[in-house]
Image (cartoon, rainbow, N blue to C red):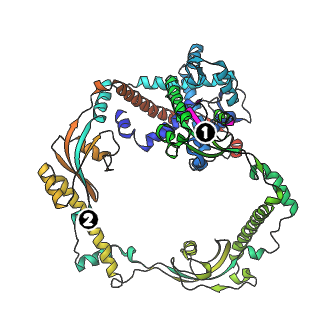
Amino acid sequence: MLSLIRNNVQSFFVKAIVLIVCGVMLFFGITTYQDQGVNTLAEVGGIEVKLEAYQRYYDQTAQDLRQRYGANAQRIMEATNLKQQILSQLVNNALLLKSAQFNGLAITDEELAQWLRSNPQFLTDGRFDQHKYDELLKGMRSSSAEFEAEMRQELLAQKYLNLVGRSHLVSKEYVETLYRRDQTEMTAKIFQVEGEDLKIKAQLSPEELQAYYNGHPERFQSVGAFKLNYFLYGSSDLTGQAKVSDKALELYYKKNREKLYTEKASYQSHHILIKVAEGTNPQSARDRAGALYKQLEADPKGFEKFAKSHSEDLATAPSGGDLGRVEVGHFLPQFDAQIEKLEPGQISPPFLTRFGYHIARLDQRNNERRRSFEEVKGEIEAELVGKKAQRKLALWQENATKQLASSPLSALAQGKTITETPIFDQQTDLGPLGASAPIYAEIKKKKVGDKGVMELGANLLAYEVVQVTEPKTKPFAEVKEQVALFAQVEKEKELVAQAMTKLTQEIVDPAAFDAFSKRVNKKAEEVQFFYKDQQVGKFSAGREFVQALYELEPGQARFIAQGNMGYAAILVAKTQGDPAMGATALGRMGDEFKGQKAQVLLAGLVDELRKTTPIHYNAKLMNALEITGRP
């Protein structure tokens, strides 16, 4: 198990597991199986995943993404299929909760009270603040009983995670070994070598060229070519068939007035974020934010400068804390509430959200505005006429495809002129039809006499294949220059790889390093780095490269080949990390490694529980919520 984690902890696979298992910390609204109804999304072995849980978790995650990525958040949510991910995480949560309960774990009243008393979200001057607690619950639209029941489940999940971590210990000696390696500081002289630096030129005989041609006939084939008879059918052929009445336009406007034609109240703002580290007293972060605020009071025009140098929101700090223009309600309620108090240009005192302490500046406020029917009538008409025309064209295409199965193209044309294309391949300009590539992709496997209808831009192309020229290998004499070029490139690539491998055996000491440096006219760059660093100076050579340098002793040289390029290096100095000098970092490394190990084990547990636990999904509710894919 240790080797599995050691080898994969930085891989995409384990990172994905960590993202999945992080849902264990969010047991929103999972209840025992007592009152299943239409608001139950899934039932997991007697535990319900409620609609309220899904909606709350989705809203929070979406809000977090908007806070971090702004205008790109919606695209990210769609690309990652966020809806399916959230339901999957909630099902995983239910499986782990069931397992925790089966193993006799529970959260006592004292454990819950201790958590509430120590949560920085509920504290004022280090003490529990009932008013702040009530306000947060109001923002979450939750009662204290509901919230505390959910927290019991979240704390139970944490207890289960800790139990798994403690039951699979990582030895102190092992962590110290990793620390020494990761904190090892090295100095090396390095230069990079490309294939062209070796000045290798391949000379091929006529026999070798002929052999390359014979061995790669597919590279020298002509593509297939076609000739079609066709006509175009488009929206101009639907004269009078796609009209929309004024009554339909007005009905569409009334139905979509709020959603499409009302610009909601919005604002533009900047912010500076000082994060509160999990499990720490928020006083330090509050003091830092307070000190920044005093500086901003003295120099309000320096807001962007302070945001770039002090904000811990990595997504907005580079742009001076710019949050762009957003609708009211886009960010957290606490953020909107502070913005509401400001006039354009004003800066807020520090205030706390779950992200940390913010200092916000309002740049511009935009009131809600509704566009009148007369303003948007033309837009609506164009949209509805276009949609109606699309439906008509789709119906025509469906009927035309069926008709062509038993009738000639002329029967479908009904008086339209049938035109013949020139013979064409995938790179031909077909004049009124444009580039041939999309047509070629449609018909490349067709034979003479085949007919069909395809979309081509805004029109439909009805066609019949009347001529096919099959692909064939071009004669050697015709492609001799091409053969020579391809063969030489491949041969030189092969020779370069062999030369790189040979260099790994030749460059083993400083004298060989210096001689090779002069031969390829490359000057070595001296760089300092730690084993844990992702990059060595300007050289992005990867972990294999760093490991190879780590294995050297000072004064030793090595050539590290990576395909058709490589790195010559000589280690100048190496100082191993001392665990005694970094007790805090060492403890954190041990905790992180145990956490990663526990997460891998929990992911395996979830997989096993999914195989043995009955899971029933509410398909109708999933369809209504547009949750696609298997959770």
Residue carrying label 1? 361
Does the magenta-highlighted stretch encompass residue 358?
yes
Residue furthest toward the right?
Answer: 247
- Taking the spot 79% from the left edge, 51% from the top edge, the residue there is 257
Magenta-highlighted residues: 339-360
| 271 and 512: which is toward the camera | 271
Residue 390: x, y in percent?
A: 73, 66
| Disc number placed over residue 196 in the picture, else none | 2
Q: Inspect this view and state whether residue 224 appears.
A: yes
The residues bearing labels 2 and 1 have C-alpha atoms spaced at a distance of 55 Å
Q: Which mark is in front, 2 or 1?
A: 1
Task: Tell me if 317 is positioned left or right of 451 in this view.
Answer: left
Task: Tell me if 591 is positioned left or right of 320 in this view.
Answer: left
- Taking the spot 31% from the left edge, 47% from the top edge, the residue there is 537
Could you tell me how many numbered marks the image carries? 2
| 282 and 18: which is toward the camera | 282
Q: Inspect this view and state whether residue 465 appears.
A: no
Please, what is the three-letter code of the amino acid marked with disc 2? Glu
Please rate how many residues cluster around mark 1, counting C-alpha atoms within 10 Å: few if below 14, some from 14 to 19, many from 20: many
Vertical comparison of 49 with 229: above or below = above
Please, what is the three-letter code of the amino acid marked with disc 1? Arg
Please rate how many residues cluster around mark 2, counting C-alpha atoms within 10 Å: few if below 14, some from 14 to 19, many from 20: some
Does the magenta-highlighted stretch encompass residue 250?
no
